[in-house]
Image: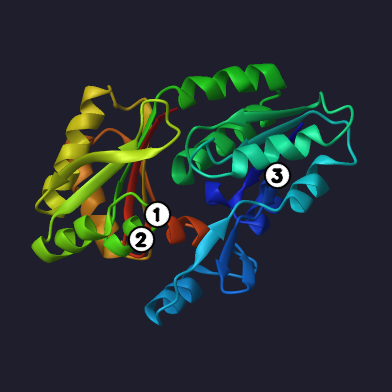
Amino acid sequence: MRIITDTASLFSPEEGKTVGISVVPTCVIHGDEVYRDYEEMQVDTLLDMIADGATPTTSQPAIGDLLDVFEGTTEETLGLFIGDGLSGGYQSAVGAKNTIEDNEHIHIVDTKTLAGAEGYLVQKAIDLRSQGQGLEKIKIELEKSIDASASFVIPADFEFLKRSGRLTPIAAKLSSMIKIVPVMTQTEDMKKITPFTIKRSWKKATEAIAEQLKKIGVDEGYMIYICHGGDETAAEGVLSRLKESFCNVTTKMMCLSPSMLTHGGPGCVLVQAIRK
């Protein structure tokens, strides 16, 4: 069984080769140039570009790249891409599948998430495949994790929220001036990002996230991911505070991919919980 994902899962194409999966790059766009995650664009390079005044955007994997990995085989294929509505990656994958005749062997699962949680689903699929589990069994097990996941983002640069339309220009300016810390989360259908709360400090923001994770039942049966936009110190602070509330929960800290960092902005911290 083939497993295909995108770099929103924080797997690079090179890492994909080492674990026996195909990873299709999402892209960072700056001016007329298009850069593929981890191949033509690295996080440090992107941070330098932004520091120099660049305002990059992103695009989902190219249809041609998706077709390259979908075509030429009748082997059962499982596609795990960034959640529908969070980006165009899922719809692009479905569109690529639908252009192929006799495509019944291709199965695209809506992960309803991104970054660390998406990567967890990919790793879970890899592990279940190595155990000899069939495609349908793997899909059932993945859905159990998908249905018990949550994501929160603490932005550090309000300009990125403003450009994404998640904060009005006036609200973004006021937020920066009075030093408030907004926290965003997914809507109930998990297709969009919506405000969760506003606090006066990162400590209070982290505490609010911890309380919500407790409410949804996060315990040692979950993984918690802390994904950051290039600021390890901020991420370590969030992780340290969460460990006080979830000392028995396995945690993992990761850096966002270039395209994911472009969405969240430099310095952002993403907190995610997903059932194992």
Residue at disc 1, secondary structure:
helix
Q: Residue at x 47, y 55 (%)?
A: 260
Q: Earlier in the sequence, mark 3 or mark 1?
A: 3
Q: Which residue is drawn at 63% across and 38% down?
A: 91
Is residue 243 rendered to the left or right of residue 112?
left
Give the number of the disc on residue 160.
Answer: 2
**Disc 2 and disc 1 in contact, CB within 8 angstroms:** yes
Q: Where is residue 199 in the image (x, y as percent from the top left)?
A: 12, 47
Q: Distance between the residues labelled 3 and 2?
A: 32 Å
Q: Is label 3 or label 2 in front?
A: 2
Q: Look at mark 3 in the image and give the residue it sits on.
A: 21
**Residue type at numbered disc 1:** Ser
Q: Position of residue 92 (x, y in %)?
A: 67, 42
Give the number of the disc on residue 164.
Answer: 1
Quadrant where the C terminus sits is top left
Would you identify the image quadrant in which residue 162 lies? bottom left
